[in-house]
Image: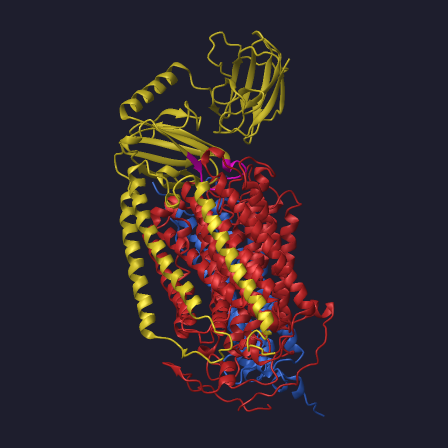
Amino acid sequence: MATTALHPAAPAYRSSLYDWVTTTDHKKIGILYVINSFVFFFIGGLLAMGVRLELAQPGLQFVADQTYNEIFTMHATFMIFLFVIPMLAGFGNYIVPLQIGAPDMAFPRINALSFWMLPLAGILLLLSFVTGGSAAAGWTSYSPLAQDRPLGAVGPGQDLWVVALVLIGTSSILGAVNFLVTMFKMRAPGMTLFRMPIMTWTVLVTSVLVLMATPVITSALIMLFIDRNYGGSFFDPANGGDAILYQNIFWFYSHPAVYVMVLPAMGMISEILPVFSRKPLFGYRAFVFATAAIGALGFSVWAHHMFTTGAVYLPFFSFVTFLIAIPTGVKMFNWIFTLWGGKLTFSTPLLFALGFLSMFLIGGINGAVSASVPVDFAIHDTYWVVAHLHYVLFGGSVFGIMGGLYYWFPKMTGRMMSESLGKVQFVLMFVGFNLTFFPMHQLGLAGMPRRIADYSSASGWNDLNLLATIGGFTIAASMLPLLWNVFVSLRSGEPAGDDPWEGNTLEWATSSPPPPYNFDHLPPIRSERPVFDQRHGDVPHTKTPPGPDRTQQIPAGR
Amino acid sequence: MTTDTTALTTEHSPVAGLAHDARGGISNPVLGMLLFITSEVMFFAGLFAAYFNVRANAAQWPPINPESGEAFHIAIFPLVGPATVLLILSSFTCQFAVWAIRRNDRTAFLRNIAVTFGIGVVFLIMQGIDYAELGREGLTLSSGTYGTTYFTLTGFHGAHVFAGVIMLGVVLYRGMAGQFSARHHDAVEAASLYWHFVDVVWILLFSLLYLLPGNAPRV
Amino acid sequence: MARSPRTGRSPSARFGIRALVVGLILVVAVGAAIAVGVDVALTGQSFVSSFFPPVAVTDQGERIRDLYGIVFFIAVAIFFLVEGLIIWTVVRYKRRPGDDELPVQTHGNMIAETVWTVVPTIIVAFLFIISWQTLNVVDTVSATPETRIRAVAGQFQWSFDYLADDGKTVLYQQFLPTGEDGGMTVPTGRTIKLDLTSLDVIHAFYVPQFLFKRDVVPGRTNSFEFNVKDSDAGQTFRGQCAELCGAGHRIMLFEVHALTPADYDAWLQARIAEKAAAPTPAPSGAPAPSGEPAASGQPAASGQPATGAGPTLIVSAINVAFEQTALTGPANTPFKIEFDNKDASVPHNVAIHEGSPTGPELFKGEVFPGVAKKTYDVPALPAGAYAFVCTVHPNMTGTLTVN
């Protein structure tokens, strides 16, 4: 059995605050990302409660119109840029080097820099609330509303928003460079690309998307900043600019961004489903190609956000939008057939993965409905879209993140989380989520537009809005068992050991938490399930046995 | 007396794999720089997209300056043309420096890097003077779409030249401190890749802003 | 105590957890059933029809609704199929306690992959084709529409210009977006071409019963055509801005009134005649009388009337807000309001309501776009508390104390 000998495992010790602040260890940085992201998840969630409170009943009860505009703008901004994207980057940071058998990321100091730009950006965004009002033109920040003109985005709030987003974008891009070099250059011997776990593959494709798309929104934001502060004429028709140009550049990033937000979560459940079914992932190669196809196609569909502008070539964008449903469907069936014929254990990670499957199915279907241009003419900019985006981003990404949290918390901390509390959280979150967002399909179809602080009771939207608010409070309630679970488990959770779930991938071949530089020794890598192979030896399988090792051998002790 | 510095180099440390993949191929820093340059290309792509869109929608290009009543005009001489030639030259000297250090010729390497660095500084100065001149003639960021796109595109290019100059300065300093050899000069490779990228972007910009013919007024 | 390889728990703990899980599943099921029941009850309509857009009042909208029906049916079928598969799999393949044997380690199946690539492709191709066909019908603009109207969107109101056949000459401008004497009046049956222009930021013209919306983008003119069904003559449809446009986004409501072609022609002719009788408001600076032949139109700087019965109150508006919040007026005496509309191209007026802004309307001044001034003659009011409001922008309010 070939091994790569490194230093012996470091003795367990508690890191000081100084260690945490100056660390370049991908595991600590990953945890910092996760913690920071949860902080902004809660802030974004509070803002969402503000939205639901105001909309529960007709009449402006709590906030003025402009404040309401600030609330939903910042809700989306925090959730997208300071919660989902960095949370997935944080899990990637922790898990990817472990899964490929590497001692750390390729550029550890840049890794730390990438992280610390995020709390800074978050502080800028929080500051904007007290500097005369935050950005209030929607997270999409369309021009000319986002320009500095009366009745538009007056004041520094919008500028702070631009600066914060440029910071976050830079953090993402540097992170993507780091991930790609790590995955291409630092895989352990035997770890060919087609033996990398799907989680790692999704981070790879996500990093390509981040690398290629994020700079484009940086350019749009900078051009907006120049318009607002230096008399520029990019996007303001009053100065000879073009409002639609902003939308094209913005959505060229923001559509791939939604795949950035969902692909790693798909990777997470692609790790969870096989382990808790005790079978390999069905159709590994199909997964890789489907993920790559989604990534590539994701660059072609952006103008489906602009069907009603009258300025896009509708048939092309409708066609490619429908097309992207196909690789997504392939993945859905591959997940289901991973479960099929397996022996399922309904631990909390699996529950969240199953929730992901069902909710993302709905989100994918209602998205496909929107791909039909004439139908989109009716439902664009209504609550139908709010339902769609939350089904894919909350029902999809957040459920995936929760699954990943319960799955990898033992590896990160050495302790198991409470299954009972986890199940309570799952039920509350699942019920609350559907109660909140399912009625929004009906509200959107009935004609309720987005981004309105209030509605007339003559419209007939009262009851569904009240139902959605009750659901919102249920989601908020589900956070309590989560927080309690984290705190209790950190203090006195059952010790996890190396491999509490009988996992398949390399992170389960080392201690929980892993030592610095991750591995004392690596098992032989002959398939995408090296730990499974080590545990079970020669297990009969159908169709595609693990291939021969085509990599060179590295002599030990160099 | 020779000191054994092998322990200081990464290839003997436990984290050897972090910098050099024993399977060969380009080093991590060089791959990282190539990927970063890809992202920078996409950034300029966004700016270029805006420029093309603005040009296509304009009734006339260059547009009429409302103050003077005549079309805007940016001159290739005496500043921008020669600056372009200098920048192209600097790519050559930069590559000479890379070839020099690859064959361990530290003297030639330092000389060429210093020249490249110097040309970069001169380019920035020339651009600054050009900006001041244009400002005097009435062309600024707020001069409608023409001024906005011109100064945004060339300004961000200038910012990238500035970053490149700093990179070259660091490389020059480290080179003078003897930190580079034929076996270890990743930073030189990476910096030179960035510098070539900066040059290529300028050639594109120069062609589009100065050489591409304008549109006659549409009736 | 026996430990299962996965959860490592004792049998008694496993029983407790099993009970918990069963209990939770029951809660979920009951909760879901209640939610569905509540949803059905609250929507006040059949559960199924709440998943459809409103019945269309235009020919184009009807085509869209038919398309939606097909798309929705396929969507629901796929959902039940796949979700059913998930639920069945999850129920069927639960691990029996103590069963530590590995299941068959299937890695994949090329036939399966092919099937679930090809079948969705066919479904998706079908959906694309029928959508494209519908789009070609719904999104055409003909060379000679029978009626031409322009909707002008601004922060924060809609106004409607009725155009002559050349598409440019304005026959009549309607500044009130809602109400019996406001909104966009259209003939049924005829092809109506609507041009959309914006005064400032991006808005969107959306009528849920048309199943249609189109953005209103400054710097470009979007257009679309529609035919209101004959059976909907006499109806009023509500519309609303559907693109965030600032603090007043949610109040940008409008109405569409459908009349038979004959009624519409008569209506338009009456409006044109009305407009010819009353002079249009003069552009900025020159104050115009509000229709009374004995004009008192010379405002004095101090607000004292030059001629006329009562005092002249000064009211002005800019950036969709009144600059005054409280006025006082004389009881039982007619008085004047000199209204300075400083918002370029934005229509405002001053209306007086009893008690609060939503109280009964007692006086409504003529709506006109800025920058312009008008003087209104307000009839005598008894002492009391009133509110003054802009009829176009109901959030523009102030108090009027009459004593």
Residue B48 percent location from the top left of the image: 45, 56
> Is residue A232 in view from this perspective?
no
- Residue sitting nearer the eye, A115 or B167: A115
Give the quadrant of the C terminus of chain A: bottom right
Q: In the displayed structure, would residue A508 be above or below residue C213?
A: below
Colour for chain B in the figure: blue
Tell me which chain appears yellow. C
Residue range in magenta is C239-250
Residue B34 percent location from the top left of the image: 50, 71
- Asked where in the image residue C332 lies, by quadrant, the reply is top right
Q: Residue furthest bottom?
A: B1
Residue A467 percent location from the top left of the image: 51, 45
The color scheme shown is: by chain
Residue A238 percent location from the top left of the image: 48, 39
- Asked where in the image residue C385 lies, by quadrant, the reply is top right
- Residue sitting nearer the eye, C259 or B219: C259
- Asked where in the image residue C205 lies, by quadrant, the reply is top left
Left or right: residue A384 versus residue A501 is left
- Residue sitting nearer the eye, B28 or C174: C174
Query: What residue is drawn where x is 69% and y is 69%?
Result: A492
- Residue B137 colored in magenta in the image: no
Colour for chain A in the figure: red
> Is residue A378 in view from this perspective?
yes
- Residue sitting nearer the eye, A148 or A86: A86
Left or right: residue C250 versus residue A9 is left
- Residue C248 colored in magenta in the image: yes
Q: In the displayed structure, would residue B109 be above or below residue A448?
A: below
